[in-house]
Amino acid sequence: MCSHMNFSLSVPLDATPEQKSRLQALQLAFAQVCNALAPVVQQSRCWNRVALHHLMYRQLRERFPVMGSQMVCNAIYSVSRAARLVYQHPGSPFCVGRGGAAGTDVPLPRLVFLPSAPVFFDRHTLSMKQNQLSMYTLDGRMRFQLTLPAEQVALFERSRLREVVLSSRPDGQFVLAFVLTDAAAGEVADGPEAAELPLSYGGDELGAAALPWPSYLKVEETT
């Protein structure tokens, strides 16, 4: 098995007010899809990405026709990933298998994605060529001209795109965080779902010993 070396790169977007409005609309819609799926995860105790896809993809596409098919897949991935954090992370009080609050006779807490939740992209919904970025939005592709340092351009040229996360800062600045894989390591399967990466959202790295959750994710206990 080939070992893959991952590289992380953050790129602020120089967005106009109109572009920011479109990105905010996408971010809100993405969170709405995640919040429609989260109760299913809580009630079924199923957060495997593939199983969730088979269970809910068609229903989510029908309920949210404005979202593209691949963005629905990415929302399923986002919920699956957050559920692994809350229900499986060894530092979580709700870690399944530890007994107590995680016992099968006690309801799991509910995940709530705030409007600031990041949006996951993949090679189908975002691409970059010759410093021009093309990304999916609810009303068509949006393009940005990026001016990157030579070393970052070289990193893109020699690597494969594995995952891209769009997040927003409190000041309204949108940032794209790229995760790239060394192209020499071999082929990488399509989509962010192919990557079992460290639990990181919008710049929040979560160590094995401590949570809180990322600021955009609420965990609501049920009685």
Image: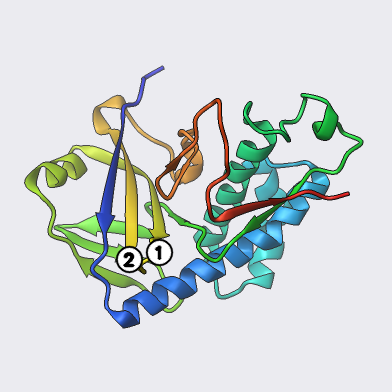
- At x 18%, y 40%, the residue is 155
- Residue furthest to the left in view is 150
Residue located 41% across and 58% down the image: 167
Does the rendering let one see residue 77? Answer: yes
Residue at numbered disc 1: 170
Distance between the alpha carbons at the discs numbered 2 and 1: 7 Å
- Above or below residue 54? Residue 137 is below
Q: Nearer the viewer, mark 2 or mark 1?
A: 1
> Who's the residue at 26% across and 33% down the image?
183
Give residue 194's position: percent from left, percent from top.
48, 38
Q: Residue furthest bottom?
A: 18
Residues at marks 2 and 1 touching, judged by CB atoms closer than 8 Å:
no
User: Compared with residue 21, is residue 132 higher up or lower down, i.e. above or below?
Assistant: above
What percent of the width, then of the height, locates residue 215? 53, 52
Q: Looking at the picture, which amino acid does disc 1 mark?
A: Pro
Decide if residue 97 is on the left or right side of residue 10: right
Q: Write down the residue under mark 2.
A: 173
x, y percent for residue 164:
38, 50
At mark 2, the secondary structure is: loop
Report which quarter residue 31 is drawn in: bottom right
Q: Amino acid at mark 2?
A: Gln
